[in-house]
């Protein structure tokens, strides 16, 4: 649903990088270049960013009161 604060495998803090990554990729930059510049070198951290599907807005519509 939301990007994890730390990588599940290596424990590197990555949650603070998500917004800048998303903005830059939506602006048309290459995801590989963006991840390199943000300091995501390990494949486990890169996999979290590439495989993440943001479902927060979809789930928020069905919130119970």
Image: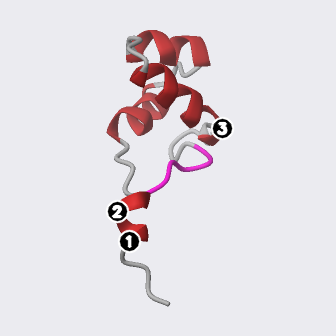
Query: Of helix, strand and loop, which one carries label 1?
Result: loop
Q: Give the residue displayed 58% in from the left and 11% down from the top.
A: 37
Q: Which residue is mark 2?
A: 58
Residue 15: x %, y % from top left: 61, 42
Residue 1: x %, y % from top left: 42, 58
Colouring? secondary structure
Q: Which residue is mark 1?
A: 61
Q: Magenta segment range?
A: 1-6
Of 22 and 41, the residue lying toward us: 22
Q: Nearer the viewer, mark 3 or mark 2?
A: 2
Within 10 Å of disc 2 (Cα), the crowding (few <14, some 14-19, many 20+) is few
Within 10 Å of disc 1 (Cα), the crowding (few <14, some 14-19, many 20+) is few
Is residue 4 one of those drawn in magenta? Answer: yes
Residue 45: x %, y % from top left: 49, 33
| Residue 43 quadrant | top left
The answer to whether the residues at label 2 and label 1 have Cβ atoms under 8 Å apart is yes
State the residue lying farthest toward the bottom: 65
Q: Give the residue displayed 61% in from the left and 32% down from the top.
A: 17
Query: Of helix, strand and loop, which one carries label 2?
Result: helix
Of 22 and 6, the residue lying toward us: 22
Query: Of helix, strand and loop, which one carries label 3?
Result: helix
Q: Is residue 16 left or right of residue 33?
A: right
Res. 16 mark: 3
Q: Give the residue displayed 36% in from the left and 77% down from the top.
A: 62
Relative to 60, does residue 21 appear above or below in the rendering? above
For the residues labelled 2 and 1, the Cα–Cα distance comes to: 6 Å
């Amino acid at each position: 649903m939301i990007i994890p604060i730390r990588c599940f495998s290596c424990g590197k803090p990555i949650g603070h990088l998500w917004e800048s990554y998303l903005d830059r990729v939506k602006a048309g930059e290459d995801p590989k270049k963006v991840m390199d510049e943000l300091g995501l070198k390990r494949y486990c951290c890169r996999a979290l960013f590439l495989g993440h599907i943001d479902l927060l807005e979809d789930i928020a519509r069905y919130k119970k009161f």
